[in-house]
Image (tube, helix red, strand yellow):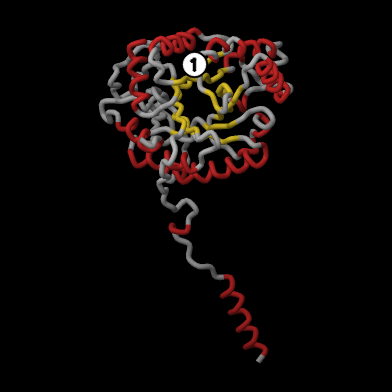
Amino acid sequence: MKHIYSILLLALVLASCQKDEITAEDHMLNYDIEEVPVTEDYNVGALYVTNTWNANIEEVPLAGQYPNADETAMKQHILWADSAGIDYFLFRYSFPEVAVDKEMISSFLTQNSDSLLNFAFRYNSVPLKLTKTNTLEQQGKKDDFIQSFKDMIPYFDHPNYQKVDGKYVVTMISANKFYCDSLELVYQELREEMSAIGYDLYLIGEQTGWTPPARFEHYYFNALDAVTFTNMFNNAWYDRHAFLPQSMDLHWQYSKDYYMSKDGLEMIPTVAPSINPKINNPNATTFIIDRESDFFWSILNVAKKNIGPSRTIIINSFNDWNFNTQLEPGESYGSSSLELLKKQTKKN
């Protein structure tokens, strides 16, 4: 009798250890992206970059391969952007100064005479070559850094400079590599000096790719107003490639809740209609995201689902042909990317 009880007990234990069969349908990424209706216009910014016209570029721009800061091309770009509901271009502003940046901004201001678009700056501190052992303070450049923002005042005074809640928008390129001895103090002094002369700042930290938010939070908390990830497409993980909209959705949901709950920091979605890393690096092992309307539709709706208080979506990019992320019309796809963007971000 004891033998029979032992057999029955063993059978019950084995049965309790068995699990239901797991299928692809059970995967956390296996869900459809749903459309988020446009009940109110979204604020749409687009990165505007310099181009080197890599020989590997296969797409043919409808505006031709124009020189950087070309005014004829700039005028056409402004008209196209306005037709797509883009609210502003984001231009690089380097410290120390880079001539092509100023030329690009000047071209825009000259050709935007009808005030169709706004503009804002992407602050580029990369030329400083900051490191953890060669910080802003150690280079003796803190006062120069603050002065470089004061040098923006003539641009801030332009009626078309982009603002959020009356604050002047400036994004910080590679904000997670802005090495300072006391980063919070540097940003605090910057804000105080600018506010004292009437210019409150809305600072957005650009991070090149998504990481768990705690990894770089010390570069953002008590320093910035928002964070965005300018590139979530350049990756070599097949699951992220196959389910990219779903992956971004889960990443952004987590980041949005984390940043907002811990420091009141806004998470701003940045998306692109496609990407081809092999244009710049033919040996790249990263995946190509083809320009397909279903993908761009999905990624825009993921952005809308995870929108922050300022209702801002950033597009990377308007004209980066070296990575095929451009919204700018091309021969093979016409203005389809621009048309889809407007339909998904503007009420009319």
Residue 133 seen in render: no
Task: Tell me which residue sits at (61%, 83%) in the image.
Answer: 7
- Horizontal placement of 172 versus 83: left or right? right
- Quarter-wise, where is residue 61 in the image? top left
Residue of label 1: 159
- Quarter-wise, where is residue 11 in the image? bottom right
Residue placed most toward the observer, 235 or 283: 235
Element at label 1: loop
Q: Amino acid at mark 1?
A: Pro
Residue placed most toward the observer, 326 or 127: 326
Residue 291 lies, in percent from the top left, at 34, 35
- Quarter-wise, where is residue 10 in the image? bottom right
Q: Give above or below for 10 relative to 81.
A: below
- Horizontal placement of 55 versus 230: left or right? left
Residue 215 seen in render: yes
The mark total stands at: 1
Q: Give above or below for 261 relative to 88.
A: below
Task: Tell me which residue sits at (37%, 23%) in the image.
Answer: 321
Quadrant into which the N terminus falls: bottom right
Residue 273 lies, in percent from the top left, at 38, 33
Mark 1 crowdedness (10 Å alpha carbons): few <14, some 14-19, many ≥20: few
Quadrant into which the C terminus falls: top left
Residue 176 lies, in percent from the top left, at 62, 28
Task: Tell me which residue sits at (60%, 84%) in the image.
Answer: 8
- Horizontal placement of 157 versus 47: left or right? right
- Horizontal placement of 298 versus 164: left or right? left
Q: Residue furthest bottom?
A: 1
